[in-house]
């Protein structure tokens, strides 16, 4: 019942936020306050909420890790260790120094400084994502500081018992840090050596169920491994995302995991609201508001100074400081641990924990409003000099990204193929010869390897995901060709595409009269019949007027559907049922291309059009295919050869 209530409240909060034009984060926080024990008391199972919220933080950090890579992370190493180190160190020193000046004990002062040094990774990265600034300079600097904060948690967990007169001393700290460093190093080695080939094996099953389970297992497994070393689960999940980003399947993993991430992130923000006791706030309103204001002021000033010391301009320092001006979710854990050991927030005794939680929840709720102050404040600053701003279209490292879309795939004014079957292959090669740019989104590792080998832009991802199509800005494409061989997948892709880009020109194919009518009803402008030469029809629609029909016919003649002659059909009973015509799926052996191998000759399967290498080649993929699929007849795919072969009757001509 508690889980059901959690889901209902999340859905209502999301809808209410939409109607009131609030950020979903604020809606979830307010909903948590309303249904929590301090108000209506509908949700009373703290363990359930805590577990769901922890999963939400993990999945959020996992998706952020997927968007990065080890190379990109190495570029912001200075932001992590210098920027993050300055922010955490100066915050602890400033908070502890101010409290010591007011007579607070040293242990409570340092403990309070540790609590205030952390910011909410979940809230900051969610806001950056909604504003499209994850890869902007503000996002890069914020992420660097947040990563260091997660690393600093390891030391704080060990330091708090020592402040209370317990713990293993300096030797215990050094041992724990060494163990954490070893686990992180192991994860990074796995990113290069283990995960990419593992993801290849999983992706080749073409099963969304297996792929999703493998990705979730990798996320939770890596996070749990790092937690054993004392590193936060959130940082472990971020490292797991980095593992996936080193393979070719980051976009596909993002599409699969995003619905889960949204669900559990809602639980996290609700859980924060649940911790606010309205009765306590009403009885200590002045103290809570004063604490929240002082915390925000301290953090904004210290973080601004830290970012400026990095050499960044005020136009970066101020937005970063306003974004990270709240207190992080892990501080709740540290506060509970410290209170159990006799430490208190700001030396306030038993009231300290309540004041800290109330002030933290208020700051989290007002973070979007605080971050929005950046625009008006920056408008008052003098315009930056030309040397102080990056060229339009460059990213945080100064690299030109104007030719790339989301996930590095160019889409604007191009033909985009969703799926890469036989007809798409033929059409793509013809477009290439005609000088027409195209991009491909496919779920096939072999097809992607072929395209990468030719230098063509390709993304391995599930193109039935609306989020992916929005990120690609598919509406800017010149035309979209849905070329999936599965009729059900074609309809699903078209249905999702029309919700994202209702005006984009769509070309697809139908395998039956019913399918033809269904695709037209879903909004496809051009539905090609299975009885018509599909590749020729696609080319007719997409090629410019200056490319003559004779040129297209000449290209199609070089890659025609293949058949068996009447003489060959008469020689073998299997040939009569496998006479063709079939369209060769490629003009290469895709399995050899994927493995980085070469071949001697090519053979085409007369049952399905599979193209594989001959028995004189290293891998003998044609024979493997015939034996594995039970397809008896192959034909030579070499120019000028028309002989065929039956594996069961072993005949040739």
Image (cartoon, helix red, strand yellow):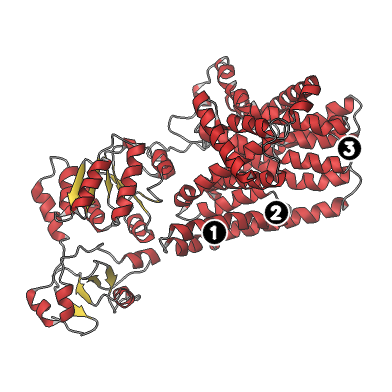
Mark closest to the chain's N terminus, 3 or 1: 3
Quadrant of residue 23 within the rendered picture: top right
Q: Position of residue 420 (x, y in %)?
A: 30, 55
The reply to whether discs 3 and 1 touch (Cβ–Cβ < 8 Å) is no
Foreground mark, 2 or 1? 2
The residue at 19%/73% (across/down) is 635
Neighbours of disc 2 within 10 Å: few (<14), some (14-19), many (20+): some
Can you see residue 217? Answer: yes
Foreground mark, 3 or 1? 3
Cα–Cα span, label 3 and label 2: 26 Å
Residue indicated by mark 3: 107
Mark closest to the chain's N terminus, 3 or 2: 3
Q: Position of residue 180 (x, y in %)?
A: 72, 54
Q: Secondary structure at mark 2?
A: helix
The residue at 35%/67% (across/down) is 591
Q: Secondary structure at mark 1?
A: helix
Q: Which mark is residue 192?
A: 1
Q: Position of residue 580 (x, y in %)?
A: 16, 68
Q: Is residue 346 left or right of residue 552?
A: right
Task: Please say if 589 is above or below 320.
Answer: below
Mark closest to the chain's N terminus, 2 or 1: 1
Residue indicated by mark 2: 227
Quadrant of residue 402 within the rendered picture: top left
- Which is nearer the eye, 263 or 248? 263
Neighbours of disc 3 within 10 Å: few (<14), some (14-19), many (20+): many
């Amino acid at each position: 019942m508690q889980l059901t209530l959690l889901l209902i409240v999340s859905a209502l909060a999301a809808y209410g936020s939409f109607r009131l034009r609030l950020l979903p984060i604020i809606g979830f926080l307010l909903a948590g306050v309303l249904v929590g024990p301090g108000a209506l008391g509908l949700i009373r199972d703290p363990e359930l909420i805590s577990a769901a919220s922890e999963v939400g933080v993990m999945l959020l950090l996992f998706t952020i890790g997927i968007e990065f890579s080890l190379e990109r992370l190495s570029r912001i190493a200075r932001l992590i260790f210098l920027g993050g180190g300055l922010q955490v160190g100066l915050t602890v020193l400033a908070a502890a120094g101010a409290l010591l000046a007011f007579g607070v004990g040293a242990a409570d002062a340092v403990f309070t400084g540790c609590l205030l040094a952390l910011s909410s990774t979940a809230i900051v990265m969610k806001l950056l994502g909604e504003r499209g600034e994850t890869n902007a300079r503000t996002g890069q600097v914020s992420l660097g500081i947040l990563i260091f904060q997660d690393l600093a948690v390891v030391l704080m967990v060990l330091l708090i018992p020592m402040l209370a007169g317990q713990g293993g001393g300096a030797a215990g700290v050094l041992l724990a840090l060494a163990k954490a460093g070893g686990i992180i190093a192991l994860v990074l080695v796995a990113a290069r050596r283990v995960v990419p080939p593992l993801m290849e094996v999983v992706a080749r099953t073409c099963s969304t169920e297996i792929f999703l389970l493998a990705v979730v297992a990798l996320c939770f497994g890596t996070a749990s491994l790092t937690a054993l070393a004392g590193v936060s689960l959130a940082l472990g999940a971020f490292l797991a995302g980095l593992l996936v980003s080193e393979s070719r399947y980051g976009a596909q993993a993002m599409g699969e995991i995003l619905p889960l991430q949204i669900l559990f992130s809602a639980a996290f923000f609700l859980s924060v609201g649940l911790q606010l006791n309205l009765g306590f706030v009403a009885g200590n309103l002045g103290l809570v508001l004063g604490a929240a204001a002082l915390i925000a002021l301290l953090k904004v000033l210290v973080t601004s100074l830290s970012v400026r010391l990095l050499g960044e301009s005020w136009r970066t320092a101020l937005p970063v400081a306003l974004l990270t001006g709240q207190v992080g979710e892990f501080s709740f854990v540290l506060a509970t641990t410290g209170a159990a050991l006799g430490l208190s927030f700001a030396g306030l005794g038993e009231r300290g924990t309540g004041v800290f939680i109330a002030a933290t929840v208020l700051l989290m709720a007002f973070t979007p409003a605080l971050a929005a102050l950046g625009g008006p404040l920056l408008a008052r600053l003098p315009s930056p000099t030309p040397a102080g701003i990056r060229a339009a279209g460059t990213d945080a490292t100064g690299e030109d990204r104007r030719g790339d879309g989301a996930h590095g795939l160019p889409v604007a004014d191009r033909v985009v193929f969703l799926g890469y079957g036989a007809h798409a292959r033929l059409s793509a090669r013809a477009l290439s010869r005609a000088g027409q740019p195209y991009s491909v989104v496919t779920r096939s590792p072999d097809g992607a390897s072929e395209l990468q080998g030719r230098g063509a832009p390709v993304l391995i991802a599930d193109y039935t995901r609306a989020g992916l199509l929005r990120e690609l800005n598919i509406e800017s494409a010149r035309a979209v060709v849905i070329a999936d061989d599965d009729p059900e997948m074609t309809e699903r892709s078209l249905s999702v595409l029309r919700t994202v880009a209702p005006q984009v020109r769509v070309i697809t194919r139908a395998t039956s009269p019913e399918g033809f009518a269904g695709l037209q009803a879903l909004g496809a402008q051009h539905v090609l019949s299975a009885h018509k030469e599909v590749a020729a029809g696609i080319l007719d629609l997409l090629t410019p007027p200056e490319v003559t029909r004779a040129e297209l016919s000449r290209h199609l003649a070089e890659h025609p559907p293949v058949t068996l002659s009447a003489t060959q059909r008469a020689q073998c009973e299997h040939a009569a049922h496998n006479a063709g015509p079939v369209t060769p799926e490629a003009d290469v052996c895709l399995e050899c291309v994927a493995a980085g191998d070469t071949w001697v000759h090519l053979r085409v399967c007369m049952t399905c059009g599979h193209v594989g290498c001959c028995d004189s080649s290293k891998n003998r993929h044609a024979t493997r295919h015939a034996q594995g699929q039970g397809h008896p007849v192959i034909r030579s795919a070499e120019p000028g050869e028309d002989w065929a072969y039956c594996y069961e009757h072993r005949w040739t001509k």
